[in-house]
């Protein structure tokens, strides 16, 4: 009788035991970059809303957006392509190609920043300043904020290049390149949104 009870208890215990559920883990760097993206989206959403409200109030000067901003937009699009190719190179263990493409992306990012600055100078020649009509002020704020965030993106690019130069990136370790690509593509899309927005709502 005792043996039957022990067997019964053992069976109950065995049936009652449940394996612990697997916990889905998220890479901390990917989490940080997506948090970064969400924060920037909220920031620019509030800024563009403020832009539309202020524009509707009147006293809004219209001005021509310098052509160099069009060229800088094209430069940024090309840099996004080279960034995508960089990630593909990392996944294929093509380290030399990875370093070259990351370097090209970095140079294109710097060229973009330089063109944005030249665009500001063109605006000043038109008489459009930061402290002036709200339309010009918003333009400087939008482009300036984007340039600041692009500077952070360039920092990640430089870190990626250094890691590739030290042969620490390969197909089994692409997290840094993925994070870099995600942030860079986002900054590209953000600029396209801002540029179209400023063109349409002048």
Image (cartoon, grey):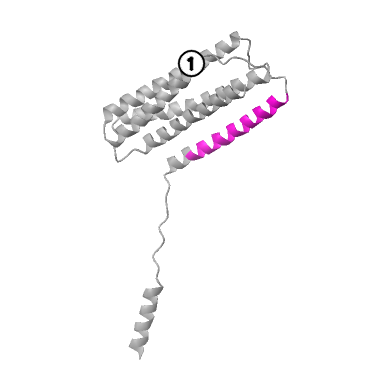
- Residue appearing at x 27%, y 27% in the figure: 96
On screen, 119 above or below 106? above
Which residue is depicted at the point 52% across and 23% down? 147
Is 48 included in the stretch rendered in magenta?
yes
Q: Residue at x 64, y 32 (%)?
A: 49
The reply, left or right, for residue 27 in relation to residue 131 is left
Is residue 94 located in the magenta-colored stretch of the structure?
A: no
| Residue ID at (57%, 22%) | 199
SS assignment for the magenta stretch, majority: helix
In this orientation, which residue lies closer to the viewer: 16 or 71?
A: 71
**Closer to us: 192 or 41:** 192
Residue 165 shows up from this direction: no
Residue 138 image point, x, y percent: 63, 23
Q: Quadrant of residue 98?
A: top left
**Quarter location, residue 66:** top right
- The x and y percentages for residue 60 are 69, 19
Secondary element at tag 1: helix
Please, which residue is most extreme toward the bottom here? 1
Q: Which residue is mark 1?
A: 115
* Residue 36 point in image, percent of width and height: 51, 36
Start and end of the magenta stretch? 34-57
């Amino acid at each position: 009788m005792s043996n039957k009870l022990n067997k019964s208890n053992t069976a109950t215990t065995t049936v009652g035991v449940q394996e612990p559920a697997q916990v889905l883990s998220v890479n901390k760097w990917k989490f940080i970059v997506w948090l970064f993206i969400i924060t920037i989206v909220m920031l620019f959403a509030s800024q563009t809303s403020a832009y539309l409200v202020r524009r509707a109030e009147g006293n809004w000067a219209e001005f021509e957006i310098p052509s160099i901003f069009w060229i800088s937009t094209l430069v940024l699009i090309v840099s996004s392509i080279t960034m995508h190719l960089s990630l593909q190179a990392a996944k294929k263990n093509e380290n030399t190609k990875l370093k070259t493409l990351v370097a090209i992306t970095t140079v294109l990012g710097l060229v973009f920043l330089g063109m944005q600055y030249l665009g500001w100078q063109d605006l000043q020649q038109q008489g459009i300043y930061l402290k002036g009509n709200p339309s010009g002020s918003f333009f400087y704020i939008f482009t300036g904020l984007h340039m600041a965030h692009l500077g952070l993106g360039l920092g990640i690019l430089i870190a990626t290049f250094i890691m590739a130069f030290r042969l620490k990136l390969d197909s089994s370790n692409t997290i840094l390149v993925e994070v870099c690509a995600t942030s860079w593509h986002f900054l590209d899309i953000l600029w396209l949104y801002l540029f179209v927005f400023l063109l349409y709502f002048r």
